[in-house]
Image (cartoon, coloured by chain):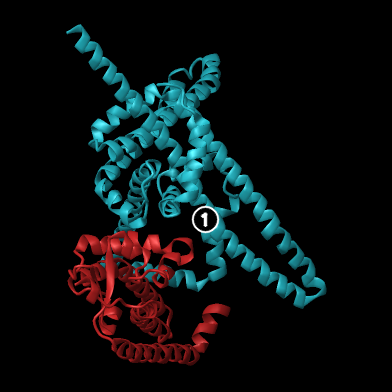
Amino acid sequence: MTDKIKYASFWERVLALLIDTSIYLMLITLAIFKITGVNDFASLLNNIYDFVLLNLFLAVFIFPIEVAMVSFLGGTPGKLIIGIRIQKESGKLLNWKEAFIRLTLGKAVSGLFFGLGYVWIFRDEKKRAWHDYVNNSVVAKKNNYGWIIGFLILCLFLFINFETVIGIVASIGANSEFYSSLIFG
Amino acid sequence: MKTPDYSKYIKTSFAIAKKNKWLWIFGALVGAGNNLSFDWISDLAKSKVNDKPAPENLFSLPETSAKVLGSATDAIKDWVYHVPFHKWVMLVVLLIVLVAIGITAVVIIQNWARASLIKSVNKALSGKEVTLQNSSPEGFKYLKKMVLLSLLIFSLTLGLMVAVPLFWVGIYFVVQSVTILKILWFIVGGLLALIIFLITFALTTIVNIHAERFIVLKNYAVLPAFKAAFTAARRTLLPAIITGVVNFVFRIIFGIAVAFSVAVFIGLPTYLTVRAASSDLTLAIILGTATTMAFVIFIFVATLLSAAVNVFTYSNWNQLVNDYYKNQDHDSGEKVKEDNQND
């Protein structure tokens, strides 16, 4: 059973991480777009307040959502899109406690010494990072061509992010008088 | 307890820290935990000494800023009153939850690292191989007890920090009608309170060191570990103080080495960069890049060495506690023999 597991490579895991990051980034850039789309002070303050709430909300709820996704589905959206799965050597998914430990303690361990624990994937024969060592998990590859789909989806998300940033710049340009009056009085 | 061989402790700990690099991970997390945990209490106490009075114009800031910002301040005031109440509640709740998650994560990481390090150092002392994989489960095994113990120690420390100044202030108010007594208590009582605080703080630290090891190495429950730690602290007071001093000296040496390295590898190149900037921009850019790289490498090496120093100190404590256990077993063995002979 153990011999049949194909382990996800460092680059596949990085791709999954980039997809996750681009999803969160999309939520944030859309909120910034909303902020810059107004030209009166009260609405601006309202939108900034909502932006702060959104960020706090993300900070509080993304973590339990990730724990739930890892324990029920075997990974965050990025990993699921690419077709890689966090599991035990036996093939079982992590329980919620193990998922919690992996995402808190595990990531803290891997992040030590400038992220040396992540680079360890290159060295380990089962392509494990230090956070995989912590609760004895592996990242298995379920789909050989998942990275192609992942790459295309990442491009799409990056394009949406790019378009939103362009929109933000255009909004600021359109409301330049309002922003100048805010800064220079 | 027999006088421990401190030079053997140091040699062994040095060898353990050098050989078992996996332990550095726990050492780094224990070190990181120190910065994130209850040290803020002592920092708070220290900061009081250096607190400068707030500048007088600080109190007139609202009026002066209102003059400068003019209508914007009024608009912000209006907006604050118009934000629905539920949004303020949401903000506060989210902040509290976020802080709670952060504290929980830090407490878990720190206690896991401590338990893993204590157990793994003992493994290494007995010549067994130590890896992240075989040490990590040990940390989880004792995590709950270690968290409870750290809460207990935290409560005690906090109680101590409140009780000692209260005692001093209380007596001060009682004797304040008599001027000589008031002055006398201000000086003598202050010193007394400081000494009492330092002694009890040191004792609590030693008890904590023993209790952690009773939990991890002897699988005690929290309260029995705490009680046993009191007895152990009493019996090993002098060796524990000496071990503490040895660890402290090594930390100081490490601190001096770090400060010296900063001066040589960061300070000097920075100075040269600043000097070169006025005459040769290309040279300044090259030197600036080199300094930045040196800084990054320095941080990396300093973190590694700091982790190794933590492993070293934990190993010293483990050896002291192990010697205490051996003596205890030996003493209880002798007692059984005596009892048998008496029978």
In the picture, measured across the screen, residue B223 lies left or right of residue A122, that is left
The extreme right residue here reads B279
x%, y% of residue B86?
25, 66
Which chain comes out cyan in the rendered image?
A: B
Q: Report if residue B95 is visible in the image.
A: no
Residue A151 relative to residue B72: left or right: left
Chain to which mark 1 belongs: B
Residue ID for mark 1: B303
Q: Is residue B309 above or below residue B231?
A: below
| Secondary structure of residue under mark 1 | helix
Q: Nearer the viewer, residue A167 or B259?
A: B259
Query: The chain shown in red is which?
Result: A
Residue A116 at least partly seen: yes
Along the line of sight, the residue nearer the viewer: B96 or A148: A148
What residue is shown at x 64% (from left), y 50% (from top)?
B259
Q: What residue is at 35 percent from the left and 39 percent from the top?
A: B154
Residue B34: horizontal and vertical position, in percent?
44, 47
Q: Is B46 drawn above or below residue A163 in the view shown?
A: above
Considering only vertical position in the picture, is B309 above or below A98?
above
Query: In terms of image quadrants, where is residue B338?
Result: top left
The one of A101 and B214 positioned closer to us in this rendering: B214
Q: Position of residue B267 (x, y in %)?
A: 70, 58
Q: Amino acid at mark 1?
A: Thr
Image quadrant in which the N terminus of chain B is located: top left
